[in-house]
């Protein structure tokens, strides 16, 4: 079972967040928490919060033990940029781009266990998606009539 957690619009440059993300990729949950708690990086604190959130989601929603989790995948994408101007001498201004990040973390089980409640939720979601794709809404091929009058103005 995989647990996917996202953090959007983090006000830290993706280049700096990737440095901390590379440290925990492929590690167990406990080892990743330990690494991030001793990393002197602003983004490490945010990654640690995201890791704790993912562990809580796995524990509460899917009944997965924290000791059985590892960081399967983590990637950092660039979010929207905030553009600002820095005033300089002689009436000039230099642009400043304040970058944001989107972080996606995927936790997976080391030794997969079969959890009946989580499996039922998963099966219901699959059935629901199949029923929606099997019965799509019929499309009407009739063109809408133009509401404008067909008289010409002279």
Image: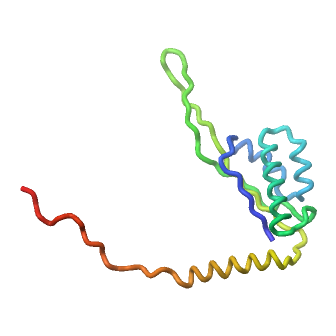
Query: In the orientation shown, which residue stands out farthest toward the left?
Result: 154
Quadrant holding the C terminus: bottom left
Q: Residue at x 32, y 79 (%)?
A: 142
Relative vertical location of residue 141 with respect to residue 107 in this rendering, above or below: below
From the viewer's perspective, tell me whether residue 81 is left or right of residue 19: left
- Residue 29 vs residue 147, the one in the foreground: 147
As displayed, is residue 117 above or below residue 104?
Answer: below
Hey, which quadrant is residue 122 in on the image?
bottom right
Left or right of 151? Residue 148 is: right
Task: Name the spot of residue 95 as percent of width and height, x first.
Answer: 55, 30
Residue at the location (53% across, 84% down)? 135
Image spot of residue 139 (x, y percent): 42, 79
Closest to the observer, 134 or 88 = 134
154 vs 109, nearest the viewer: 154
Query: In the rendered image of this protein, does residue 101 appear above or below residue 141?
Result: above
Q: Position of residue 24 (x, y in %)?
A: 84, 53
Write the residue at 89% across / 51% down. 33
Q: Residue at x 58, y 32 (%)?
A: 96
Q: How is the image coloured?
A: rainbow
- Outermost residue on the top side: it is 90
Q: Quadrant of the N terminus?
A: bottom right
Left or right of 148 on screen, residue 127: right
- Residue 31: x and y in percent read 92, 54
State the count of labels. Answer: 0
């Amino acid at each position: 079972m995989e647990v996917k957690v996202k953090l959007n619009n983090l006000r830290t440059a993706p280049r700096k967040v990737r440095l901390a993300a590379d440290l925990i990729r492929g590690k167990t949950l406990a080892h990743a928490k330990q690494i991030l708690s001793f990393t002197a990086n602003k983004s490490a604190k945010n990654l640690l919060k995201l890791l704790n959130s993912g562990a809580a989601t796995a524990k509460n929603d899917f009944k997965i033990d924290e000791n059985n989790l590892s960081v399967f995948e983590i990637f950092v994408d660039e979010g929207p940029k905030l553009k600002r101007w820095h005033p300089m001498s002689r009436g000039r201004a230099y642009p400043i781009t304040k970058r944001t990040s989107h972080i996606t973390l995927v936790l997976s089980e080391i030794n997969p266990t079969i959890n009946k409640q989580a499996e039922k939720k998963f099966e219901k979601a699959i059935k629901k998606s199949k029923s929606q794709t099997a019965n799509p809404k019929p499309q009407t091929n009739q063109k809408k009539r133009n509401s404008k009058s067909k008289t010409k103005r002279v």
